Each structure stands twice: as C-alpha cells, then as structure tokens.
Image (cartoon, rainbow, N blue to C red):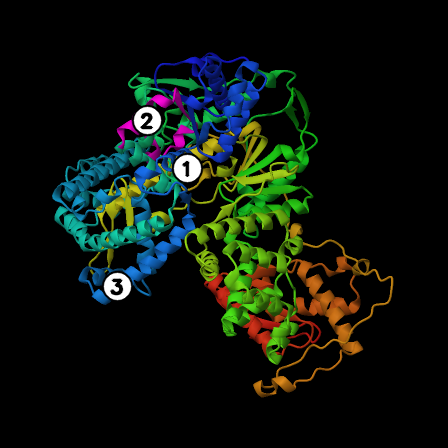
C-alpha cells in the first residue's frame, strides 16, 4: 500500500504529543498498526506500548492486525509471543490490571471482580426504599415538604430522580465535594446564573432581529418602528418590549419564504415570552432559593446511599468498572512512585477513537502522560454522549495542538472507502450544515474529505452514483404509515437494482447482490414491519440490533420455573402459584391446552402434572444447589435447549442462558443464595432493565437493516436511509430533578403550583444545542458508511426551512433539488397486499397415509359450581363435536391469514359452509368500523405471569376491541376470565378503554365480556 504524505507523518512523527484527526475511511487503523510495526522494528518492545481502545472487539482486532504484520518477520518472533500479554486493551481492562496489581494500597483483595451494573441499580432501589422509610418516620420538615409538593400518587418519581442524580454525580472524581449545599446556594453562584440568563435573552433578541431584517427587506410595508423594541438593556426592558414585537399581516401573494420567515419570527417571540415569565430579578432569585430545602434533603439521601453502596461493594470486593476507573485514578494520583513508573514504562500511549474519551479517562491519561500520547479520532464521528463521551476533549486539544501548544496535529482527510460522487455529495451537505457551534467543527475549513481510492474510476460503468432523495411527499396517504411507504419504496427499488446495478468488488465490477444493500434508520421501531414487507417481495432481510435479555420469552419462562420451584418448596399454592403454573404450561416447553390446564385446578390434581413433578424434584434439593447449579438443573430437566427450536434461534437462547449463568456466579460471590437469585431475576424483568446482548449476523447474505449507532465502523456498498422523520427524543429535558456538570443541581420550586427556575432554561438551551450537534454527527456517520450509492427516502417539503426536530429537517436547511426525485403516485402504487394471504388449498395440508387412532377425549366441560369440582364428569367426544372442532380450526386458520379490511374470499376457493361462516363474521357488528382500526392478529403476550395469544385486536383512536374466537361454546366462565385478562393487559399497554367479546364461529353469535 502506498501511503499518503499525511499518513506517513502519522506513522513516523515522534517527540511530542500528537492528535490525528482521521476522517471516515481514512485508514486510521492501518496507520495505527503500521506505527506499531515501525516502533517494533526500531527495537521498542510491544510490552512498552500502551494501546487503548474502547471495545474488546477493537482490542482483539488490533492484536490480530499486529500479529499478521509481524508473524512473517523472524527478527520479531519474540514480540509475537508477547502480543497476548501486551497492554492492547480497553481503558477498563487497563485500570482493572492496575487495581489488581496494587490492591494492597487500595485496601481491596487481589481477586477484585466486576459486578453487574443491574445488581447495583436494584441494590440502590432497595436501599432508597429503606432510607425513605426512615425519613417518613422522622418526619423531617424538608423531606415532608419535598414529598407533599411533588408526589401525587406515590414517591417513585422522587426515588428515580435521586438515583439519576446520584449516578450523574458518581461520574465525577470530586463527587464528595459536590454534595455540598453551599456550593449552589450562595450569592455568587446565583448571580452567575442570572448573568448567563440575561446573556441568553440578549442572544434570543439578536436571533429575532436577524429574522426581522430578512422580513423587513422583503416587505413593502415599513415596519422600522419595531427597531426600537430590540434595544433592550435589562430584564425589565426584555420583558416589556417583547409584547410589542409582532409582524403585521402579510399581503396576499406573499412568497413561501416570507411566510416561513414570519412563522419563525412568531415562534422566536413566543420563546422569549416563555423566558421572561418572572416579574423581576428578585423573583428569579427567590425561586432558586425556594429549592434549597429540597436540595438539602436530596444530598442527605445521596450521602446515605453512597455509604451503603460502598459497604455493599467492599463486603465482597465486587465493584463496577466506573469504581475501578476511579480507583486507578486515585491510585496513580496519590502515589508518586507508581505515577513515575507508569510515566517511564511506556514509550508511547496510543488511544484509538479519542473523540469518545470520558472526563475520567482523560484525567487518568494526564497523570501518566510523558509528552508521549498519540491520539487518533474524529470529532465528526463522536456519537456516544449518552455513554459519557465528551467530544470537547478532542476539540479543545485539536485547537491547542493546531497552534503547537502542548503537541502537534495531523489531518487524515483522504477517504479510501467511498467513490468520488459519494464524497462530493457528503462534502456538499456538511459544508453547509456542520459548523463549529453545530457539530463541533467547521467542516468546510477543517473537515472536508478528499477522494482517495482511484480504483473506482477504472472501467467505471455508465451509472448514476450520485445521492438520490426519493421524495414521497406526493404519495402520503392516511391509510399508510410513513414506515410502510418507505419499506415499500425501498423493497421495490432493491428488486429493480439487484442483478442490474454494478458494484465494485475485488478489483472489478459485478452485479449487485442482496448482501450489497443496507438500510440505516435512526431507530429500530419499524424493523419488524420492514421484515414483513420484504418477505412479501421475497427479499431476504436480516435485522442487526441489540436484543434486550429481559424481554425474551424464554428468560421469562425460565424465571417463572425458578419461582414455581420456590413456591412448591415453601408450600405456597396460592394465586401466584396458579399464574406461574399456567404460564409454564402454556409455554413452548409444554404447549398444554387451556382446557387441560383448567382441569388441573378444578380437580386440584396439578401435583400429577409433569410440570409439578419436575419442580418438586428440584425443590427437594434446592438448599444444596448453588445459583449456577439451580439454573443448570432447570435447563436440563425441562429440555430448554432442545425445545428452543420452536421459538426461533437456539443460539440466542444459549447466549441468554450463559449470561444468566455468569450473573448467577456473580451474585453467589455477593452472598446471594438461590431464593435471592430468583427474586433478583424477577426484579430485572419487572423493572425492565435493559440488559442488552448481540448475536453475530454479519455473515448474512441478505439485505441488512440496522440503526445508525450499530453501523459505526462498518461500510456498505449501497445504502438506503429510512425513518428520518422520527422526532428527536427530548424526554430527559422534561425531568424535574436533574444534576448537570455545568449548572449543578437543578430542581423545581413550588409556589401554588410547580415551576421551573432559570437554571432549567439554561440547561435546556445547552442540552438542545449539544444534542443537535450529536444528531448532525450521527447523520454524518450514517452517510459516510456508504461506498457507492446513497439513497435517502423521506417526505421532504423543500418550500421552507424547518426547525430541526428530526434528521430529515437537516435536509430542509440546504438546497436539495439536484438530488431530489419527486415520486409520482402513478408510478408508485402503494399496496397492502403484504398483509394478505395467497391462494390456499387446505387439502394440501392433509396427507393421511394410515388410519388415525383417536383416544377418548374429554373437553368442553363447564364448571357448574365450586362445590361440584370433585364430582364433575366428562362425556366422550361425539363425531359431530369432532367435526365441529376440525371445522373451527380451519375457520380460525383462515381468519388468522385473511386481510380483514380488504377480504377477497373468492380467491380462497372455500366451500360454501366455510365461505358462509367467514362472511358472517366479516359482516358482524363487531367489525363494522374495522377500516378505522389498526389490526393485530395472533398477538402473543406475557402479562402477570400469564402467556397467551389473542386472536384479534382492533385498535381505534380512543378505544380497543379484543375478540377471542371459539369453535362453538362461548358460555364457559373460564373463557370470560381469559378475555378479562386480555382486557387488563391491553388497558395497561394502551391506556385506552378496552371492549372484550367472545365469538362463536359455528353459531355466528357473540358475547360481551
């Protein structure tokens, strides 16, 4: 490989700190690897290099590349043997190695281990309950005031807020100093907030004036009389003058641009009015001081919580990675000899993905640096603020080093990933959008990419490789969601391009395959819909996303088995026992029909069931089992791995169970026994804690779909961008209790109602700008994944610049006409056919080669009274009843697949009896408003330890209808109970009124539940 001039600088330059700004596709990993090789060739051992990455996968990849570089070099054979033990690792791993090495200085054991964050979260939750209980008893006046002012139904909102504040404070190295009430409630601090607030008002007025100037220059009417109102100097004038700032009515025929500007002006005036809601500066001060008592209580609770957690971790020497990072920092800071040793141990400290460094990591590096830190990253790709990454660290250092203050900077601008058109298109977009104050870099001056891979130009096909925006604004239809429209457009387009569009691969052009196409979206909410539509078009689609372990069906069933064993152990055959038993009986492990399950409870002979027997056997030996052994016994006894094939990926089940095994070991080391472990798993599920895991689907030969964060570091030939209309999530800004590094503790005040102080306004303003910057960088990451062709699919109204509330709105800020392809409804007829079934000959499903022997069946019984349970008799199934059941099953199957809004029964070649029953149901009153409904069929759910499948759900704007089909009998009390359970589940899920019905397929009648 021939290196560019700047790549050679990045490989060879020595003698000072270096920051390498490596743009997308610039070969930064190859450069980093080559720099390591050069050092090894110069006699520097791999053990004298500290190479820090942000993921274990990145560390493994780096080791693999270095090994490949040196394994053919005989003179470096010794280094080859040192690679596995070398410090090529994550920050967390390096910090842990230091803490273990010098454990005696930290008063921890050498075998200190890492505890799962979820264990700590649940411990915090339990302890905060205890602290609140004590405070309720003490009746502390500030605590009582806090509760009475902000709690309506319960105190959960305050508890969650305190945990959030504690977690934010815990990210600080000076946490103990920050839990000091006087730090926030002194005249200097309050005056600084007011000064920033007045500056914010001044900025808002300046922005308003700019809009005014644009309008005044276009408007024929003289509105110069408004100018005097912009000359505000203090809060009183800001408050008074804004009421006079109003643009008169525009004349008929005004341009769209002028209308848009007036709309912006009005919005900005409203923003200012919201900011000047206080009477005067004195009121502003008073509202802040009113929160002092609340802060005092919260800090008191946090101190108690911190003491408890420290003791909990210390007891078993189990700490979080954050704890270990802070230990390592204080270890080095407080011990001169260790600091000196580390400073002189490493020839160089290399940091990959430096733009994602956290404050703690940066402070740690400062302690061991010796003018030998080599930092590689790209601020334009900093998208992990939610993981505490601080892009300002990279930005500030780049600015300093650019002036040769403290080090030097090198720019790697050549992009070897993408073809020329892709790079030019991206440069065009971000030249306009990305600035120093939005995105963190002046893209036009310091961020532009240079086309580097000239191989694309050899024998280049006559194809359009430029960006295209498929604008479907004229296809919008209330009958279709945007996600449906986008999926249909993309599926059709891929069908057209596969085997016709040419892509560059291994030195030559070939026809595109499905695996060359990737869809990137802002979030994964609509991925199942894409999957369904792509199946209709017969396009293989692989969803690449993190799974949430506690949402998985098999884990919930496993948890229920654990709980059932303990119920049996304690002899608690209560209502919860019934829930658990029923859930397991209905699950993929047994698939027992409801009639049989009910029989167990009616006859009270569930102890004869296979479920009870297995659980009872485990309950006998429960006290002898470790947490891991308990899990292993359940998995083995219930054949979970063997039966997992019925619910999807066996690999997924095994990965999830392995996670639980490791969790079991970790909890054992913290003194959790089997009952504690079982309760812990249950609490994880109940609290919906997001334990995420991934399955490797990288080898899939189909189209891939993933969110943008998941695509980081990857590259794809042809990229579609969907879901760009999804609004940004600002839910965190609605929180009332906040801690922020810049503004400190942010609390509401109470004065005949809840109000927000100016500190919250300042915080919101800062957070929104930082979030928009990260969203823009996210958009940059998305586009720079593409090698050959970018296609954006959205409904773009290019008549006005919109306030940026979603990724699509970035496009409204720039001229896009040269990329835009306005889709014509005549050419793009939308369809709901993906919801329909194809022609089915039901006889094809019946293949009888020998007589069927039917055992005596007992079913369709009805409980007469509680007194007659033990005397109940059941009749043998008659021929007519059996025929009814077979007929009912066939009806049920057709309804499962039929498009209920657009049914075409003639296509199904149904017999007259089947046709009549289906038609009767379609014409029933239950479905009279179905065209206004969202339809869900065969909806599987797990609720209150029950697992079931709801036949039909019709969701309307303000209510929901649930319908359960029965073959004939709909008078059974058990059926009513079942549907009542469905209603409760749906009311909880939707917040809407739910109406339940039982429908008899044979009798063509319904019952209200």
Q: Nearer the viewer, mark 2 or mark 3?
A: 2
Is residue 1008 at least partly visible in the picture? no
Mark 3 nearby-residue class (10 Å; few <14, some 14–19, many ≥20): few
The earlier-in-sequence mark between 2 and 3 is 3
Quarter in which the C terminus is drawn: bottom right
Q: Are marks 1 and 2 in contact (CB under 8 Å)?
A: no
Mark identifier at residue 772? none
Q: Residue at x 35, y 38 (%)?
A: 103
Residue 457 at x, y = what percent?
60, 17
Q: SS for tag 2?
A: helix
Q: Nearer the viewer, residue 298 or 103?
A: 103
Q: SS for tag 1?
A: loop
Q: Nearer the viewer, mark 3 or mark 1?
A: 3
Which residue has dot 2 on it?
A: 368
Quarter in which the N terminus is drawn: top right
Mark identifier at residue 134? 3
Q: Nearer the viewer, mark 1 or mark 2?
A: 2
86 left or right of 736 in image: right
Q: Which residues are magenta?
A: 335-362
For residue 844, which quarter of the picture? bottom right
Residue 818 at x, y = what percent?
52, 27
For residue 871, which quarter of the picture? bottom right
Q: Residue at x 40, y 17 (%)?
A: 410
């Amino acid at each position: 490989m021939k290196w560019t001039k700047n790549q050679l600088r990045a490989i060879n330059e020595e003698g000072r700190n270096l920051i390498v700004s490596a743009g997308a596709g610039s070969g930064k990993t190859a450069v980093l690897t080559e720099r390591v090789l050069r050092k090894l060739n110069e006699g520097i051992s791999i053990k004298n290099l500290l190479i820090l990455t942000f993921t274990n996968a990145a560390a493994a990849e780096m080791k693999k590349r270095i090994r490949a570089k040196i394994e053919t070099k005989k003179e470096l054979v010794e280094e080859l043997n040192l690679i596995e033990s070398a410090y090529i690792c994550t920050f967390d791993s390096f910090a842990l190695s230091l803490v273990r090495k010098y454990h005696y200085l930290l008063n921890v054991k050498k075998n200190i281990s890492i505890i799962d964050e979820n264990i700590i979260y649940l411990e915090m939750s339990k302890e905060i309950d205890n602290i609140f209980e004590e405070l309720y008893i003490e009746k502390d006046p500030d605590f009582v005031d806090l509760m009475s002012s902000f709690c309506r139904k319960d105190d959960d909102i305050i508890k969650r807020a305190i945990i959030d504040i504690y977690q934010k404070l815990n990210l600080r190295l000076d946490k103990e100093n920050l839990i000091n009430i006087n730090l926030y409630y002194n005249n200097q601090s309050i005056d600084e907030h007011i000064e920033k607030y007045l500056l914010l008002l001044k900025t808002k007025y300046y922005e308003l004036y700019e809009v005014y100037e644009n309008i005044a220059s276009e408007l024929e009417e003289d509105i110069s009389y408004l100018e005097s109102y912009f000359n505000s100097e203090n809060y009183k004038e800001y408050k008074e003058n804004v009421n006079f700032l109003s643009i008169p009515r525009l004349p008929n025929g005004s341009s769209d641009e002028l209308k848009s500007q007036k709309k912006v002006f009005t919005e900005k005036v409203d923003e200012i009015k919201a900011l000047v809601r206080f009477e005067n500066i004195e009121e502003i001060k008073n509202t802040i001081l009113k929160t002092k008592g609340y802060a005092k209580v919260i800090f008191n609770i946090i101190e108690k919580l911190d003491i408890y957690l420290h003791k909990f971790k210390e007891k078993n020497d189990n700490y979080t990675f954050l704890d270990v990072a802070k230990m390592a920092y204080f270890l080095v800071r407080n011990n001169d000899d260790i600091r000196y040793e580390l400073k002189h141990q490493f020839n160089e400290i290399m940091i990959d993905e430096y733009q994602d460094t956290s404050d703690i990591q940066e402070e740690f590096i400062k302690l061991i640096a010796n003018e030998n830190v080599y930092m590689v990253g790209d601020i334009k790709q900093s998208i992990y603020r939610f993981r505490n990454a601080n892009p300002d660290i990279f930005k500030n250092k780049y600015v300093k080093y650019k002036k040769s203050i403290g080090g030097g900077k090198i720019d790697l601008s050549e992009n070897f990933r993408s073809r020329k058109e892709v790079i030019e298109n991206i440069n065009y977009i971000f030249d306009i959008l990305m600035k120093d104050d939005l995105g963190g870099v002046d893209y036009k001056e310091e961020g532009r990419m240079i086309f580097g891979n000239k191989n694309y130009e050899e024998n280049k096909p006559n194809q359009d490789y430029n960006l295209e925006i498929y604008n479907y604004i004229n296809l919008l239809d209330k009958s279709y969601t945007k996600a449906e429209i986008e999926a249909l457009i993309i599926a059709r387009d891929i069908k057209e391009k596969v085997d016709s569009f040419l892509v560059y691969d291994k030195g030559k052009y070939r026809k595109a395959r499905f695996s060359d196409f990737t869809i990137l979206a802002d979030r994964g909410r609509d991925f199942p819909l894409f999957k369904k539509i792509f199946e209709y078009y017969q396009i293989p689609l692989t969803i690449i996303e993190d799974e949430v372990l506690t949402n998985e069906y098999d884990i919930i069933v496993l948890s229920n088995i654990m709980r059932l064993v303990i119920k049996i152990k304690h002899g608690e055959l209560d209502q919860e026992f019934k829930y658990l038993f029923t859930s397991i009986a209905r699950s993929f492990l047994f698939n027992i029909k409801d009639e049989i399950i009910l029989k167990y409870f009616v006859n009270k002979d569930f102890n004869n069931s296979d479920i009870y027997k297995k659980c009872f056997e485990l309950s006998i030996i429960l006290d002898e089992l470790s947490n891991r052994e308990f899990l292993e016994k359940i998995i083995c006894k219930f054949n979970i791995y063997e039966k997992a094939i019925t619910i999807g990926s066996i690999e997924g089940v095994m990965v999830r169970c392995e996670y639980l095994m490791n969790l079991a070991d970790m909890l054992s080391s913290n003194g959790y026994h089997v009952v504690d472990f079982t309760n812990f798993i249950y609490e994880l599920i109940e609290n919906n804690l997001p334990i995420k895991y991934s399955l490797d689907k990288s080898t899939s030969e189909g189209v891939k779909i993933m969110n943008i964060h998941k695509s980081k570091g990857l590259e794809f030939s042809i990229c579609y961008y969907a879901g760009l209309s999804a609004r940004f999530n600002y839910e965190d800004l609605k929180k009332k209790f906040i801690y922020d590094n810049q503004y400190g503790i942010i609390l509401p005040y109470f004065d005949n109602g809840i109000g927000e102080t100016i500190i919250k306004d300042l915080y919101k303003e800062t957070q929104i700008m930082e979030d928009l910057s990260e969203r823009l960088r996210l958009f940059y990451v998305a586009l720079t994944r593409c090698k050959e062709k970018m296609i954006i699919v959205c409904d773009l109204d290019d008549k006005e610049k919109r306030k940026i509330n979603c990724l699509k709105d970035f496009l409204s800020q720039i001229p896009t006409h040269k990329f835009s392809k306005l889709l014509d409804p005549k050419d793009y007829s939308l369809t709901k056919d993906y919801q329909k079934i194809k022609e089915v000959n039901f006889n094809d499903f019946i293949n009888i080669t020998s007589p069927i022997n039917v055992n005596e069946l007992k079913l369709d019984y009805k409980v007469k009274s509680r007194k007659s349970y033990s005397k109940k008799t059941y009749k043998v199934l008659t021929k007519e009843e059996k025929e009814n059941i077979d007929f009912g099953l066939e009806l049920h199957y057709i309804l499962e697949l039929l498009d209920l809004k657009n049914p075409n029964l003639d296509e199904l070649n149904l017999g007259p009896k089947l046709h009549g029953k289906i038609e009767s149901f379609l014409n029933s009153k239950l479905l009279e408003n179905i065209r206004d409904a969202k339809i869900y069929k065969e909806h599987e759910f797990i609720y209150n330890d029950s697992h079931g499948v709801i036949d039909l759900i019709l969701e309307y704007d303000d209510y929901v209808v649930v319908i359960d089909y029965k073959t004939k009998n709909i008078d059974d009390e058990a059926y009513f109970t079942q549907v009542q359970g469905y209603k409760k589940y749906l009311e909880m899920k939707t917040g809407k009124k739910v109406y339940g019905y039982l429908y008899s397929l044979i009798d063509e009648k319904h019952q209200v539940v």
